[in-house]
Amino acid sequence: MNYFLKHPFKALKAYLPKSMFGRSLLILVLPLILIEGVAAYVFLDSHWERVTKMLARNIAGEVGAAIELYTQAPDQETFYKSLTGNFLKLRMDFVPEKAIESSVPEDLKDTVLDMALKDQLFIPYTFNIKGGEIHIETGVKGGVLKFITPLNRLCSKSFFLFIMWVSITSAIFLLIAVAFMHNQVKPLRRLAIAADRFGKGRSLPTFKPEGAIEIRKLTSAFMMMKERLQRQLTQKADMLAGVSHDLRTPLTRMRLQLAMMAPSSEVDGLQKDIEEMNKMLEGYLTFARGEGLEETCETNMNDFLQDAIEGRADLQTGVHYTSRPLPVMYIKPQALKRCVMNLINNATRYGHAVWVKAFTDKDYLIISVEDDGPGIPEEKIEEVFKPFFRLDSSRNIATGGVGLGLTIARDIAQGHGGDIILSSSLEHGGLKASLVLPY
Ligand SMILES: Nc1ncnc2c1ncn2[C@@H]1O[C@H](COP(=O)(O)OP(=O)(O)OP(=O)(O)O)[C@@H](O)[C@H]1O
Ligand SMILES: [Mg+2]
């Protein structure tokens, strides 16, 4: 309640519809309801009251006239009865030697009819409403003169007709508006789905801009952006692959020349350097391939993970895999397998045992790879994603890698709209690498 008073708009927001369709509908419906409410209120207050007053005065006037006639010539009772009964819808009855027993009931006092009767009759009276009829009793000389008239003489039907027509037409127009609004929001919804798919690295067909002019513009801008991005990605990958490939030939030549030279420590050093360069080039090529134009396809993640574990480089180190039913997902299986295998290969390289877990959380699939190795210090966690960055730079390149594994893995994960998060493994003491993928 306090929060509501402090931030009324923020609190109200929680109750408002979240979707564009809902909001536009609210913008449309709210004024409609308000206008109808105001119209009905004004109508009820003035028109309805005025009409009812008039009708009540009519009844009172007729009753007054009948009493006046009766007191002038009581012997003409039958004639008056037929007169009021036939022409005024007023049944009249005289009960002799009787007095009015009660006064006007509390709940009917000061109603429009009571006021009208008070105005027109100058003799004692009372009235009641029973079974859809108004019973009026008046005290005249020698007895009580009773009048009965239908209650609906007091009601104006136009008010109900007004409400009914207004509601029916509004409902019809609302239905039409809902249908049109739905069509307006459809292209926007489609665009949102396409953008989401593109963000997750899935292929999407080119679709025609539709709907309002702003949405058309947005759609074509999005399609252009998508094409430009795809072109850039392909260009980058092609260039990287080209450079790496071209450099291989002179390197091979150098290696051959060195092999023909007389062995010495300098030649040995040069050969090691060439070996290192070769590995780097291979890494580059793998990186370039990771960005390749592989198509996404529906993949059973359980089978996929099993494959990735079995395809690891070091089969000597055991991998403990706890399997749970995983969803079927749209991924680039070759690329993602390389990503997961990089994480597993790191774990087997730096640890003695590996634990792989896969589970879903909200809209994400999380694959975590943990080991019991040395782990990575907190301040170096972002560094290791940089190309060619290795924690132990003195490590022999022949046994270690070139430092591209995590760079490639993160690149592929991000290409799927996900990411790789590194932390310390609480259970096993080494590194915990989690691949988070939206599905
Ligand atoms: N599971 C791990 N435990 C400890 N350190 C790790 C682990 N995984 C990665 N590292 C550190 O992060 C660095 C970068 O890893 P990355 O996978 O990018 O390269 P790499 O494994 O050295 O070479 P490669 O390109 O062959 O994968 C590694 O050199 C290593 O120091
Ligand atoms: Mg690695």
Image (tube, helix red, strand yellow):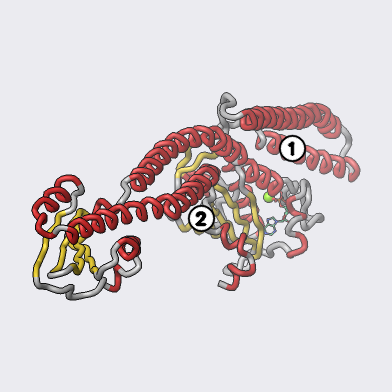
Query: What residue does disc 2 label?
Result: 362
Along the horizontal axis of the image, is 136 left or right of 56? left
Name the front one of labels 1 and 2. Answer: 2
Above or below, 133 against 205 in this view is: below
Residue 63 x/y as whole percent:
24, 57
Element type at marker 1? Answer: helix
Crowding at mark 1 (Cα within 10 Å: few <14, some 14-19, many 20+): many
Residue depicted at x 64% and y 41%: 415
Between 169 and 331, the one lying in front of the other is: 169
How many numbered circles are shown? 2
Residue kind at label 1, given as amino acid type: Tyr
Does label 2 point to a residue whose CB lies under 8 Å from ligand 1?
no
356 relative position to 261: left or right: left
Q: Which quarter of the rendered picture does the N terminus lie within?
A: bottom right
Disc 1 beta carbon < 8 A from ligand 1? no
* CA gap, disc 1 and disc 2: 35 Å
Q: Where, by quadrant of the figure, is residue 169 drawn?
A: top left
* Residue 285 image point, x, y percent: 71, 34
Q: Residue furthest front?
A: 72
Q: According to the image, label 1 marks what residue?
A: 284
User: Who's the residue at 58% across and 42% down the image?
Assistant: 336
- Residue 319: tell me if it is visible: no
Which residue is at the front of the view, 108 or 88?
88
Instruction: Give the residue type that dot 2 points to.
Output: Lys
Q: Nearer the viewer, residue 410 or 427?
A: 410
Give the image location of residue 350, x and y in percent.
Answer: 66, 58
Which residue occupies 59% across, 29% down? 212
SS at circle 2: loop
